[in-house]
Image (cartoon, rainbow, N blue to C red):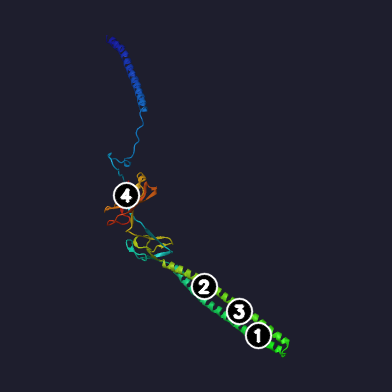
Amino acid sequence: MACLLQLQRAAMDIPRATSVKRRKLIKRIAFVVCGLGLILLTTLGLSRLKPAAPTVERSTVWLDIVKRGPMIRQVRGLGVLVPEEVLWVPALSEGRVERILIRPGTVVSADSVLLILGNPELELQALEADYQVKAAEAEYANLKIQLESSRLNQTADLARVGSDYHQSKLKADRDELLAKEGLLADLSLQLSKSTATELGHRREIEEKRLDIQSQANEAQLAAKRAEIDKLKALAALRKNDVGSLHVRAGASGVLQQMEVEVGQRVPPGTILAKVAQPEHLKAELKIPETQAKDVALGQMVSIDTRNGLIPGTVSRVDPVVKEGTVTVDVRLTGNLPPGARPDLSVEGIIEI
């Protein structure tokens, strides 16, 4: 009886398990169909949406309340005060730094000696140039004496020939008078006249030789003077080179920087120092490139030195962008507050 009941229960459980599996399968199919439908509806809805509005950075947007009247926009930038005129002092001659006489921060004049360079070879060249000038001048004096002596000899020859010509001329005149009286043969008269004529030609030649000698002497002396002038110019150049070893400021102001140290050897053209005038300053501001497009010449600027405000105007806008900023020069129109000096950090506000 118990076995019969178990068989009946088993026969009744088989259809029930099949029914459960069928319901689960139907639920899965329903879920898949619903998911696909939902995806289809979402895709269709998104395809009908309009494009989203573009976004902008907050730093590029100015917020304000709408009102009537002019709207003043300000562009800010950080920067430093720099001298309007800067003199870089170069080395004119090669040398080694022997002494530094003035340190940065000292007020200097144009003739102030900043440092002293040493160059024994340059000093020796200057000394040799002076000796060459003296030797050339001695040669010039010797040549002048020799030429003058030669001219005097030529003058003496001319005087002697002139005297001989004068005597022969007198003799020829005398012989002509005697010949007219019949007291002298014609041959002797012709000889006297021939001698006088020859001496007359010699006198003319000696006169020309004396003129040519004088011109030749002047030419030789002029060539020697030109050589002396050349040597003097070279000596002056060497002297200036030696003088440039005492490096001077070249302009009045304040020594800002000293670029060398004692014992350092510097070639010609090396920058040695920087001199500036601290009472004539300008501001160099770094403006972000996104805001620099509206900056123009002549716009009003307020420079904050943390110790006072200085009014100014935009005097130059750099056309090149460097590291995301544009350099703007500001000409200061107001008085500098106490403590204003080169390389002082400032903030500028440009009114646009």
Crowd tier of the residue under label 4, counting other residues whose Cα lies within 10 Å: few below 14, some 14–19, many 20 or above = some
Query: Residue 157 is drawn in which quadrant?
Result: bottom right
Q: Earlier in the sequence, mark 4 or mark 2?
A: 2
User: Quick check: 236 left or right of 183?
Assistant: left
Mark 1 highlights which residue? 169
- Viewer-nearest residue: 134 or 119: 134
Q: Residue at x 70, y 89 (%)?
A: 178
Of labels 1 and 2, the one closer to you: 1
Q: Which mark is residue 225?
A: 2
Q: Earlier in the sequence, mark 1 or mark 2?
A: 1
Alpha-carbon span between mark 2 and mark 3: 27 Å
In the rendered structure, which amino acid carries the disc numbered 2? Arg
Residue 47 against residue 225 in the figure, above or below: above
Query: Residue 251 is drawn in which quadrant?
Result: bottom left
Of labels 1 and 4, the one closer to you: 1
The percent coordinates of residue 233 (x first, y second) are 48, 69
User: Quick check: 123 left or right of 351?
Assistant: right
Mark 3 highlights which residue? 207
Label 2 close to label 3 by CB (< 8 Å):
no
Residue 223 against residue 44 in the figure, above or below: below
The percent coordinates of residue 9 (x first, y second) are 29, 12
Dot 4: what SS?
Answer: strand
Of labels 4 and 3, the one closer to you: 3
Label count reads 4
Q: Which mark is residue 300?
A: 4
